[in-house]
């Protein structure tokens, strides 16, 4: 679907329409099961009600996927793919700051994208410290919600700088595919309506479904071609450059970038950009 760093507009709209058809079909099946639940013998009522619930969840997943496709279609003419994804998810969840982190099966950061500003800064910090809501949701395969002092308690290295940014609440959910977890979707200071997690998990599941239908995910998360969503993060590309220049590990390179950002009192992303441009050597 990616074409020169952007997604095919017509294909996005075609697939959105197809998801609407699937949603309508699931809704019809749900209605039939709900009607049977009302008319059947009492001992069969739970079975039909459970079937209706499954069809209603499928309906919502297809509708969420259709919304995500259409949101992406509104962005593709002006934004690269990864930026379009987080913008679409921010729109769907009404969250001010969103990050998407994709990880390989051994926990290495394979791709990342975040909304400008707080989302990007928070994600950079998580990548540097190697801990945070995205990794916790990925490793546990469960939603993660932490507020206030819980943030610093749960992530002792990342928590204090997150709180220093004015982040008082973080909510992360895993991005699941049939054969594993691709990573996590995280909201910073999410609106109160998102605290039930279901709406955010629906967006994450819709994104996973979109990926499965537009990129060759294969049998494991490692098989995904992340170049189709803007490749690896700028921070990790910069860490690779520093690791080669300094003959050190990626973790040590990330520490050098973080130390320089602290000394210069600027975002790690700004240091990474200078490293990649050749302006700065560490």
Image (tube, grey):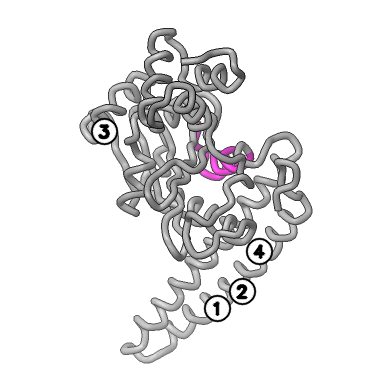
For mark 1, does the 10 Å Cα neighbourhood hold few (<14), some (14 to 19), or many (20 or more) residues?
Answer: some
Instruction: Determine whether 52 is above or below 109 in the image.
Output: below
Main secondary structure type of the part rendered in magenta: helix
Residue depicted at x 42% and y 13%: 260
The residue furthest left is 153
Taking the magenta stretch, the answer to whether it contains residue 92 is: yes
Q: Nearer the viewer, mark 3 or mark 2?
A: 3
Q: Position of residue 162 (x, y in %)?
A: 35, 25
Residue 252 seen in the current view: yes
The residue furthest right is 10
Q: Find out whether the residues at labels 2 and 1 contact each other: C-beta distance under 8 Å.
A: yes
- Looking at the image, which is closer to me, 281 or 89? 281
| CA distance for labels 3 and 4 | 41 Å
Q: Which residues are magenta?
A: 84-96
Tag 4 residue? 20
Tag 2 residue? 25
The residue furthest top is 264
For mark 4, does the 10 Å Cα neighbourhood hold few (<14), some (14 to 19), or many (20 or more) residues?
Answer: some
Residue depicted at x 56% and y 45%: 92
| CA distance for labels 4 and 2 | 9 Å
Q: Find out whether the residues at labels 4 and 2 contact each other: C-beta distance under 8 Å.
A: no
| CA distance for labels 3 and 1 | 45 Å
Tag 3 residue? 155
The mark total stands at 4
Instruction: Determine whether 212 is above or below 164 in the image.
Output: below
Chain-order first, disc 3 or disc 4: 4
Q: Nearer the viewer, mark 4 or mark 1?
A: 4
Q: Position of residue 177 (x, y in %)?
A: 47, 60
Q: Which mark is residue 29?
A: 1
Left or right position of 133 against 218: left
């Amino acid at each position: 679907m990616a074409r020169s760093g952007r997604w095919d507009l017509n294909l996005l709209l075609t697939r959105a329409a197809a998801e609407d058809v699937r949603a309508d079909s699931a809704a019809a099946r749900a209605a039939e099961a709900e009607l049977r639940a009302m008319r059947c013998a009492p001992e069969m009522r739970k079975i039909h009600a459970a079937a209706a619930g499954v069809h209603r969840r499928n309906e919502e997943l297809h509708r969420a996927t259709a919304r995500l496709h259409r949101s992406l279609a509104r962005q593709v003419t002006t934004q690269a793919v990864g930026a379009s994804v987080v913008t679409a998810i921010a729109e769907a969840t009404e969250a001010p700051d969103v990050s998407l982190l994709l990880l390989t099966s051994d926990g290495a950061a394979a791709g990342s994208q975040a909304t400008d500003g707080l989302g990007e800064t928070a994600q950079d910090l998580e990548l540097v410290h190697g801990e945070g809501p995205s990794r916790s949701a990925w490793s546990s395969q469960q939603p993660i919600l932490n507020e206030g002092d819980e943030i610093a308690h749960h992530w002792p290295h990342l928590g204090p700088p997150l709180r220093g940014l004015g982040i008082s609440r973080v909510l992360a959910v895993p991005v699941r595919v049939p054969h594993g977890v691709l990573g996590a979707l995280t909201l910073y200071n999410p609106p109160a309506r998102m605290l039930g997690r279901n709406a955010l998990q629906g967006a994450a599941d819709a994104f996973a479904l979109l990926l499965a239908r537009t990129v060759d995910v294969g049998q494991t998360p490692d098989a995904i071609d992340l170049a189709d969503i803007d490749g690896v993060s700028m921070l990790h590309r910069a860490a690779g450059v520093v690791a080669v220049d300094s003959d050190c590990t990626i973790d040590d390179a990330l520490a050098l970038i973080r130390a320089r950002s602290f000394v210069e009192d600027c975002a790690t992303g700004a240091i990474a950009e200078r490293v990649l441009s050749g302006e700065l050597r560490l």
